Image (cartoon, rainbow, N blue to C red):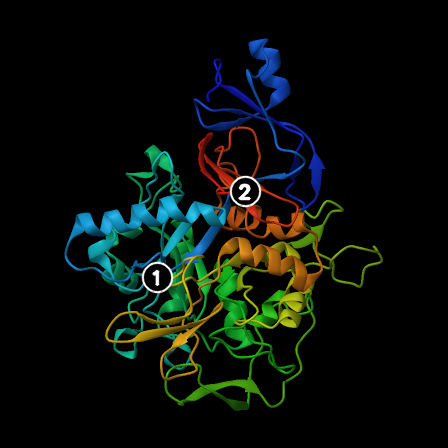
Amino acid sequence: MTSTNGLVCFTNCLLPLEDGSLVEKDLWIDERRGVILDAQQTFFLRKERPDRLIDLGGNILSPGFIDIQINGAYGFDFSVYDGDDEAYRNGMKMIAERIIETGVTSYTQERSLYPKLLQLLRPFSTPTSATLLGWHAEGPFLDHAKRGAHAPPFLLSAPEGLKSFEDIYGAENLRDVEDWTMAGGGHDVVGVRMVTAAPEIDGVMGAIGQLTKRGIVFSIGHSTASSAVATSAVQSGARLITHLFNAMPQLHHRDPSIIGLLGASPHLSSPISSPATLPARSEAFDDNETPQSTPIHSSYVTPISGLTGGISVTSQGSTHRQGSRSELHLEKGQIADMAFERPFYGIIVDGIHSHPNSVRLAYTAHPEGCILITDAMKILDPHLRDGIHEWRDGKRFVKEGDRLYLEGTDTLAGSVVTLDTCVRKFSRFTGCSLGEAIKCATYSPAKCLGIENRKGTLRPGADADLIVLNRQGIVQSAWVKGKEAWTKSL
């Protein structure tokens, strides 16, 4: 059923706002253009109301979820190429069309093979599928001791800085693009959207600023970076932390390392130096000792002074820069000046990769930066039974509920959790509202990628990629560009 004038009104529903609240309000869309409308302005200009009215029975009408880290699903692995371009494209299309049942209407693909497939991995969508936003390059510039399931022979340093990245990914895939999100329908834009790398690896730190200027989100991950190095990376432009708590040093009170960025202190104007260190166990296949990163003691750090800017938080949760203060301030509720913005962080909320207490700790420390991810592997399928499943290179997965690990080891190998499950678990683990959990799978990832005017929000002009959730967070239907693309079977 379509509207004769192209206008559709969703009514009797709850809409998630960008601050995490839920409000009872109608939403108008233009199903012909596939965009969300400003109801008041549309009525004023067109002098007509929607011909189609959809009563959602009190359910939640949310922007479609965005998964910024997914390795494959439904039996297809983005990292496996058998020499058949058409078969690979069909696999991508199959995932895009099926994954909407989990509420995901946009995602970036994780890749661990390089430049041959970049043309295939450029953004695309079909009328009934999620939108592939591009490539999340996780590797090969990773720390050996925190490589997880990444094969050691493929790990590299970047001795020539940005040129090393261009040599691996292809310079044409890292070219400057003024609007790198969805331009020209998404088919003619560069595929690289995000890069995960370890800033302590030779040459990586110097490339962060140059990658960021090209519109690429740099994410700290698979790293043993100290607090000093992690802070320098953020000051250089790093905007995200990859799967928080996993493949990084664990929180230590004398050097909180990467995790400590969530609680970055305004007292510190520059990275601190880390003298002596303690060893930690490797998170990779073997039991190598992790390079030292946690200090036994810390030297005195000079208090911050003379900063050129800071961050303050308004009652609505938005942030803005303010002038520096050299003395203690007396403004209750205001955050003291910061030299940089704390990064976003992706977190796998399956109850396995991170304990519920850890999830709540992270969210309490930095709620505005929280992004829910799946890091899902090829066997992601809500209908798949537990057991042993083939992966690649002769390796096999063992699936036990939402737990996925490599056969014969206790090494976690991504996940099989769906993003809608993460949203529900996140609300339970943190005690936050369902609306606040939805924000972490919609607005926050969109803002991280800089696409919040097109995806992840209900702003007028944004794509009408929508999902209907009941009040328990179960996906009931999915809409792509204003057209119903999937409905839950009764």
Toward the viewer: 72 or 485?
Answer: 485
Question: What x and y, as percent, mark residue 472?
Answer: 64, 50
Vertical relation: 45 (above or below) 245: above
Say left or right for 387 vs 343. Answer: left
Local secondary structure at mark 1: loop
Say left or right for 401 vs 300. Answer: left
Vertical relation: 182 (above or below) 268: above
Which residue is rendered at x = 33% and y = 44% of the image? 123
**Residue pointed to by mark 1:** 378
Residue 270 marker: none
Q: Earlier in the sequence, mark 1 or mark 2?
A: 1
Vertical relation: 293 (above or below) 490: below
Say left or right for 150 vs 275. Answer: left
**Residue pointed to by mark 2:** 476
Question: What x and y, as percent, mark residue 327?
Answer: 78, 63
Work out how far the residue at label 1 is from the one at label 2, CA to CA, in angstroms: 24 Å
- Image-quadrant location for residue 164: bottom left
- Residue 481 in sight from this viewpoint: yes
Q: Amino acid at mark 1?
A: Lys
Question: What x and y, as percent, mark residue 474?
Answer: 58, 49
Toward the viewer: 228 or 294?
Answer: 294
Mark 2 is surrounded, within 10 Å at the Cα level, by few (under 14), some (14 to 19) or many (20 or more) other residues, namely many
Whether tag 1 and tag 2 are in contact, CB under 8 A, the answer is no
Which residue is rendered at x = 34% and y = 37% of the image? 126
Toward the viewer: 247 or 349?
Answer: 349
Q: Amino acid at mark 2?
A: Gln
Question: What x and y, as percent, mark residue 478?
Answer: 49, 39
